[in-house]
Image (cartoon, rainbow, N blue to C red):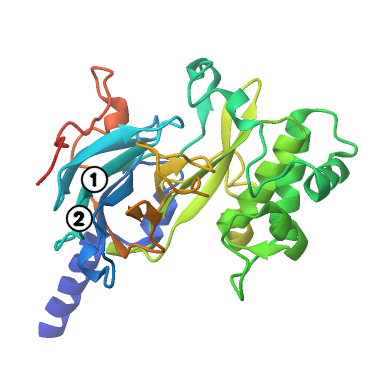
Amino acid sequence: MAKWIVSLGVVFVCLLLPSAASAAEDAWTQPARYGFEYRVDFPALTGVEADHLRVWIPYPAQTDHQKVLSADIDSPWPYKIHTDGFGNRVVYLEGRGVPNKPLVMRFTVERWPSDGVRLNEIRADTPLDPKRYLHADKLIPLGGLIKQVAEQQSRGHKTEAEKIRAFYDYVVKTMRYNKDGTGWGRGDAVWACTNKRGNCTDFHSLFIGMARSENIPARFFIGFPIPDAASGEIPGYHCWAEYYDRTRGWVPIDASEANKSGQTDAYFGRLPNDRIQLTNGRDLTLVPPQQGAPLNYFIFPYAEADGKPLAKIPARFHFERLPITSAPERFRSDGSVGSDRSVREGGG
């Protein structure tokens, strides 16, 4: 009898715990709610002397598919939250020397599966304006090899929709998700095209370059992937892309996840809820402007000591899956959406 009681207790506990399998099944159809912690370990910043230290930290995005329901920032210095030209929110602080305490940002984020941005929501001269995403970036040229490959993959395809699918299929089938050696991770489209390997940054830089070289707007996103677990550390970032469809609006793709999972069709036009978006864009000028060069992308803290960029700011990231105990924010009965009203301007 004792054995049966123990067994039933184990089964009951297992039923209460979130499982990776159930999370994966729901990720394409249901919202998820996450506790997300972004910790900047200033005390680990040894050997740095600065009369004037400036620090910029990315802040989770607020979109149709992602709501910041609550936010708390515990900062050693006063801070402000700014918004740049891409719509990215940035936490900014400055002071003398190096803080003797970490900065810890804690968020509750609700994330829905994403099918992009509808056409009727897009306005000119805003961060959603497709005209803003047709130019070359420093590491995404639109001529030379990138243009050559895009033209080759365009042959036999007349519409932009056909070309985009051909570019996506080419990247998924030709690239290998491989982080051996050096060169990967910079989002260098030519390097990715030549070496045919890399991480998510490289996959999507190649896709974006091919699309833009054919005058199809495409844009870059970066954030954090949520592992298939109830809670834990997040070991690294993840990025994806969107292209502009003249009849539909902004449409998401994730070529590197398609490559790793073998689900090529699934990751074309829709993304699961297994990520937290932070920023979009490349060659970024922050707010207030940094003295250093534009940032290749913005996911980790960036700092300048007396006007000179610091090589690396130690940071850690943690998540926890939370139950959705109330109506999902995207579907409130009054039509409103979640906000991060609990954020304090300033900090301690």
State the count of labels: 2
Q: Nearer the viewer, mark 2 or mark 1?
A: 1
296, 251: nearer the viewer: 296
Give the residue type at disc 1.
Leu
Q: Residue 268: where, in percent of width, then height?
A: 62, 43
The spot of residue 190 in percent (x, y) is: 73, 55
Q: Is residue 323 visible?
A: no
Residue 277 showing in the rendered view: yes
Q: From what the image shows, is residue 188 above or below residue 324?
A: below
Q: Residue at x 43, y 42 (%)?
A: 279
- Where disc 2 sits, the SS reads strand
Residues tagged 2 and 1 counted as in contact (Cβ below 8 A): yes
- Tell me if mark 1 has few (under 14), some (14-19) or many (20+) residues whose alpha carbon lies within 10 angstroms of its own: many
| Closest to the observer, 106 or 258 | 106
Q: Residues within 10 Å of mark 2 (few under 14, many from 20)?
A: many
Mark number displayed over residue 103:
2
Question: Amino acid under label 2?
Answer: Leu
Q: Which residue is mark 1?
A: 93
Q: Position of residue 58 (x, y in %)?
A: 35, 46
